[in-house]
Amino acid sequence: LNRSSECKRELFLTLLLPLQRSLEVYCRRMLRNPSQVEDVLQSAVMEAFARFDRYVEGTNFRAWMFRFVTLEIFNRNRKKEPALFRDCPEEIAAVQRPEDLPEDAVAGLLEDPSRVLEHLEDQVVEALWQLTTSERAVLLLRAIAEFSYHEMHEILSIPLGSVIGYLSRARLKMRRSLTAYAAQRGLFRRTEEPRQ
Amino acid sequence: MNCNEVRQHWMLYLDSEGDPELHLRIRNHLGGCAVCARWFAEQQRLEQEIGKCLSTGVLTPELWNRVGSKATVPPGIRARRGKWPLLTTLGATAAVLLALVIFFQLEGRSPSTDLTRNAADLHGQWLRGNVRPDFVSSSDQEVDRYFKTSVPFKVHCPPRTDVDFQVQGAGVFFMKDRHQAAYIVGHVGKAPVSIVVLDRASLDGLPTDRFDRCREGDFLVVSKVIAENVVVVIGSASPEVLERLLNAYGTYPEG
């Protein structure tokens, strides 16, 4: 692509603009050290811009950009979380089902999720950190940027089956953690108790 | 589809993934099964609420102003930081450079450069399938012809007879936004190897006739100025193989 530097820069920034919020939120949720957010975004954007000549216009810029940010995050988190996307064993690739959790345990959460979750803002973040990096990445890519399974497979360079496995596992772990937090804080509606 | 089978695919259905036939069958079941319909609605609502919590967050415009201005400006004219951070950075850089020079002198190797880093990165991307050659061919002559129309400088593809290099494809990319580079990918034996070729004139101040060898991650990189080209050979093959391929490059007659 033979563009002048200024045109190239303008096009890059134009494409980047609508992604800024989701990239920033993703970065904040993924990083163990929140003070690194700006550094990570800067390095990732710099790297993407340096390779912008290899980006084909009209293709998936959003996924392309998230890949740079994800790789940069993995580099930063690597010391604390060395095990990243190893070959996915079959049990990980297997889809976890909601029935795998005791029904009565999540019943309260399913009954009125918005009411329960509005009291658990910090716990949602805490629950996120109970997940492995791979689980956290797929869950956030889906929740924040609504990427399809195929896009996540490309962003993370992992098999499609692993994406599905990690996502189902992450969702169930989140439910389990949130149910426990909600129960601890007495957020579930109790059945009629005899009044004295 | 019974209730159990339908619930087995709950995630694909909620995420609008999987094939249309599956969705149709699930929809049909939900149309006639109030229990499952309620179950799915509950799951969907919960996932939406969790998703909403996770995706909440505001944009920090100042942060993006800084990111945008620093990350998309050529290094030479990047905004200067404060005096002390700059001095500290310079000091640290000098120390690292000194250590590297000592290390590489002891090792008999030269420090890696942007050129070798970019070349090794390209090779890694190709191995991972993220980069596909613009031109796919197993014929060195076809690749030669491709380059005649693709780059403004001469590029040769090593023929198999020389060093058993089996070409698979070729392409063109830009290094550091400026330097147009040609690349050739292929194998020597079973080892994947990439050759990156630049126009010598495009690299100011590059020492001539200098042979470099360095390691970039998992790959060994050898490079040399050959005639009007800068040639970089990257791979996980033995150093001897890579050097033989590099040296062979210089033996081709002008096309």
Image (tube, rainbow, N blue to C red):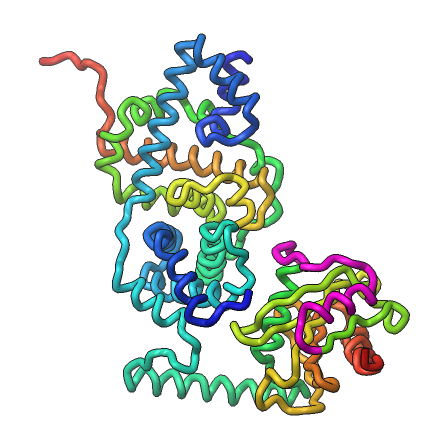
Percent position of residue B122, x then y: 62, 65
- Residue at the image position 45 percent from the left and 66 percent from the top: A8
Q: Quadrant of the N terminus of chain A?
A: bottom right
Please identify the quarter of the rendering in which residue A117 is found.
top left
- Residue at the image position 78 percent from the left and 69 percent from the top: B144
Residue at far right of view: B161
Percent position of residue A76, x then y: 44, 62
The magenta stretch is B127-153
Please identify the quarter of the rendering in which residue B156 is found.
bottom right
Percent position of residue B91, x then y: 40, 88
Q: Is residue B9 magenta?
A: no
Left/right of residue A57 with respect to residue B69 in the rendered view? right
Q: Quadrant of the C terminus of chain A?
A: top left
- Residue at the image position 35 percent from the left and 56 percent from the top: A17
Residue A80 in view: no
Percent position of residue A159, x then y: 60, 43
Residue at far front of view: B149
Question: Relative to the observer, which residue lies in front, A185 or B206?
Answer: B206
Whether B189 is drawn above or below A146: the answer is below
- Residue at the image position 69 percent from the left and 78 percent from the top: B153
